[in-house]
Image (cartoon, coloured by chain):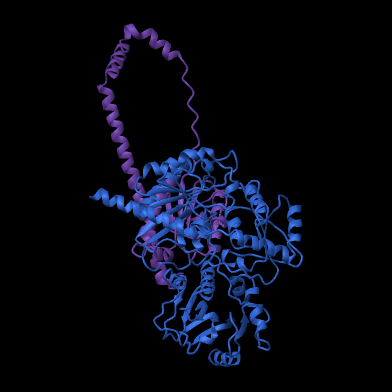
Chain colours: A blue, B purple
Amino acid sequence: MYDVAILSDLRHTGGSAAGLVAEVEAQAAAGLTTVLIHVPEPGRAHARPFDRRIVACLRDGRADLAHDDDTGLAARVLLIRRPEAVADAPPVRAAHTIVVLDEPPADFAEVRERIERQFGPDVVWAPANAGVRERLPGAPLHGTDWHEIGSHIARLASLGVLTRGLLPAPRIAVTRPTRHVLLIGDDIARFRAIARHLPGDLEAVVVAGSDGLPAAHAAGLLTEYLPAAAELGVADDRWTGFVRDRLRHLIRLYGPRAVLVGGVPHDGIAAAVAEHSGPRWLWLRPAMWRRGTGGQWAARGSLFDGILEPGEFAAAGDEGWTTAARAGVTTVDPITELPAPRPRRPSRPTLLCRGVEATLPGFTVVEAGPGDLGVVALAVSRAGYTSFHELLGARVPTVFVPDPDGADDELTRARFAAAAGVAICATDDEAAAAALERLADPAAREALSRRCAEVAFGNGAADAAAWLAGHCQRRSEVEAGSAR
Amino acid sequence: MLDEPDAADLAVARWEVATLTGRLRCVEDERDAAVRDRDRNREIVLALRRSRSYRLGRALVDLARDPVRSAPAMARHLRRSPAPPARAQAAPPPARIYVAVGLSRAGAHGLIRALRQRVLVEADHLPVVVTDQPSLRHLQVPGVVLEYLPDPATWSRHEPDSDWEALLADRVAQLCRDHRAAHAVVIDPRDPPTLARLLVTDRRVGSLASA
């Protein structure tokens, strides 16, 4: 039995496909199984292919595709999208059947009669938003709009489909990639974003510490573990040798074309670079260092065949050492996991807290990943790289409370955002509470969101993946050249 | 994951063979390294014997053996009190690898806590637990080292052409080297040992599959 079955015409592109893919990805990340049921809508060209994002979900194993002659499909929840398209759907046994109305059908009574004939009278009709509800007066709709129930996983949880945490490994690529890249470090959000855009024959293997490993595994990436010195209970000098030996083992096991090092290239990494000239060694070098810190790593740049610096919205305020060490460095837009497009449709007062505890009267505290930020009304967050760029990129009105002990210069980031008019910077709890109260006013939130849209930035994940794949290709060419 | 008893028995048996293979591979590597060390030392000794300084030193020893000319100096040397023996540093306890794959998170947690208790009872080894649970942070306890190995299902999805048991053997060999482990043990996921059984097993070989 699948956790979720989604029934729709999978050839539709645009917003409906994006929404469907986002839900599939959220389910896969939560360890839930999904089956997609394709029901061709009458009148559409039969040969038209599925939306390419849906193809990617099927290719990567994030969802199965039901056989059109399947008679034994069972799922805990059946979601029907675009019910007007459903003419002859295969039988599906489901504990809950929900019809999500992204648009009001032209003839609701006819659609309802047909759907209930196929799936029984207990079907729940959920309008996507208030606009759809208003256009269906008198229809027996569920009391809450679909997009108001919080994140997609929260909606499923409310139906009794609880996530399995990290226990079941998500299903991933069914085709065997022929080449590997090792991604070393705990920059999991950036690794996931890049890995998603790698060519199909290039598989990422994340080598993470205990902080990052669960998230990488939950995203369906093949993962390996690199224990920290403290976790082993050894001194730094012995850990250096441990890291070198572990990377030797992993390089022998996977034969990677390239090794991308996130964070700092410490002595263990340097020892491994010196020992292995086969793969191309690349550095995903963070920017935005606090002034006067990190300069000791500058010389390590010469170890690498390439350096990529993820973009920073606050780059103009960056005072770190990397600003004077950009020769030969590739830069891309900020790397995030935000979906594209990024519709913004907050329909109820929700408050997202990331790294900061806060409440606001009238607002419900929620959790949201990058795919769910469009429905978040207001956020208060630390100004770490991922949260900062995700929240601004998704145009969420945000109060940034920089962490003075953060790994990078969060204070400058938050101040820059405030100066640009895209967010509010608060350096203590009192200021954060006052800022949140100001943003309880919808007009104040709308002003910040609008300003975010005016200075919107792109997503560098695809460019970063292309850069990485290019280095793998370059290594192949070097090998071919030496063979000749 | 192991519903069929026969299949489960077979799987655990394969894991035990792979673990034994890995341990043996490490022992072979250690033997090869010891042979290399011995040969290198032998070459150093031979080179030393051929050197001018060695021949000079040897002549001085022969000279010292002349009782007439060397007796006063030898007597002075013998009257000196012997130097106190250097205090031997306490060697860290040897590591032991526990291959704990296929356990639920609660099962893995219980095992690790039992191992923690076991080394509290007697700190005679350092447990290194190889788990396929990715949430390592929740499993960490002091005195037990955690290592991670992709589970068989994940591995076969990503690497369908490669046996998971081959990965296990390779990893056990590596972990024995990394942690200087002298033993490797497979935990039956259907029946992970309690503290009591861990203590009994030390005296009765065979309850755990010891490699």
In depth, the one of A346 and A272 nearer the eye is A346
Answer with the quarter of the image where residue A182 lies.
bottom left
In depth, the one of A356 and A443 nearer the eye is A443
In depth, the one of B26 and A18 nearer the eye is A18
Q: What is the number of callouts on the image?
A: 0
* Residue A91 placement (x, y as % from top left): 49, 87
Q: Is residue A196 above or below residue A299?
A: below
Q: Is residue B54 above or below residue A49?
A: above
* Residue B77 placement (x, y as % from top left): 42, 13
In depth, the one of A392 and B120 nearer the eye is A392
* Residue A66 placement (x, y as % from top left): 44, 80
Task: Decide if residue B56 is in sight here.
Answer: yes
Q: Is residue B28 left or right of residue A101?
A: left
* Residue B172 placement (x, y as % from top left): 40, 53
Task: Decide if residue B210 is in sight here.
Answer: no
Q: Is residue B20 left or right of residue A102?
A: left
Q: Is residue A424 above or below residue A70?
A: above
Q: Is residue A163 above or below residue B179?
A: below
Report the residue at 52% width, 59% height from top. Answer: A459
* Residue located farthest toward the front when viewing the structure as drawn: A454
